[in-house]
Amino acid sequence: MSSTCHLTNISLNEHIMLLYSSDDERNNAAVNYINNGLKSGYHSIYASITANDSKNSSNISNLSSKIYNYKENIESGELKIVNFKPYYESALNVDFRPFKKLKKELEDTLNHRKSEGKKDAILVFADAACFLSQNKHFDECEILEKWWHNTTTEWARNNRNITVVCPHPGLVINNPILSLDTKGRLNGMHTITIDLNQ
């Protein structure tokens, strides 16, 4: 059962569903999470299918000026930008090999941070599931969110401090046309739900 949480509170070992109503709202939330993560000493990742899309307002060129010490954090490796478009395309084909590789990379990064005496915490803002729901690929979205749910549950069980934020368009998730079963399953796969309209 998911609960609600204030946007600026970053909890360890969470799988967060973030409902937004506009691209500006989503972008502001992404920047807030990344900034709070960086300022808290977390390794922070912006994994977006629009990260390198110059025509989209969510591209990293548009967001970088709002991100805390962007250049320094990129150069030091504290901030990583991941082009999530290939991951989205794999998720459409229910191929989780790229996600499994990412999972291992995150675990290795966490171990490396521990060995260096850095804060052993990672924040990931990942939007592949967002675009699956936005494009009405609900079955694939559920499968991907189930994978994230199982992965974040495993991390929490093993005290791996990795928090994953999955933004979703509130107009789609809260649309009466979407079955209550689907909405309930998507909501239930997250430990926290934040609706930016509430």
Image (cartoon, rainbow, N blue to C red):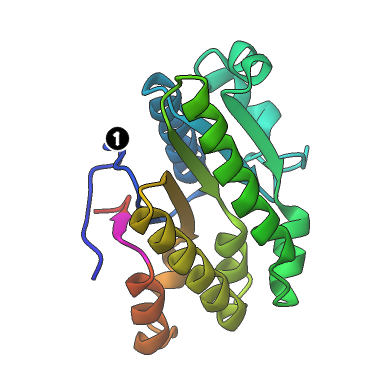
* Residue receiving disc 1: 8
Figure quadrant of residue 62:
top right
The N terminus lies in quadrant: bottom left
In this view of the protein, can residue 20 be seen by the observer? no
Residue plotted at (44% across, 85% down) = 177
Please provide the residue range marked out in magenta: 190-194
Viewer-proximal residue among 67 and 90: 90
Residue 177: tell me if it is visible: yes
Residue 55 in magenta stretch: no
Predominant SS along the magenta part = strand
**SS at circle 1:** loop
User: x, y percentage for residue 18?
Assistant: 39, 54
Q: Is residue 188 left or right of residue 137?
A: left
What's the residue type where badge 1 is placed? Thr
- Rendered position, 112 above or below 137: above
Q: What is the crowding at mark 1: few (fewer than 14 residues within 10 Å), some, or many (at least 20)?
A: few
Direction from residue 150 to residue 96 in the image, left or right: right
Q: Looking at the image, is 70 positioned above or below residue 130?
A: above
Residue 187: x %, y % from top left: 35, 71
What is the quadrant of residue 81 in the picture?
top right
Quadrant location of residue 100?
bottom right
Number of marks in picture: 1
Residue at the limit of the structure toward the front, as seen here: 115
Q: Nearer the viewer, residue 163 or 30?
A: 163
Give the residue drawn at x 61%, y 11%. Answer: 72
Q: Residue at x 76, y 39 (%)?
A: 52
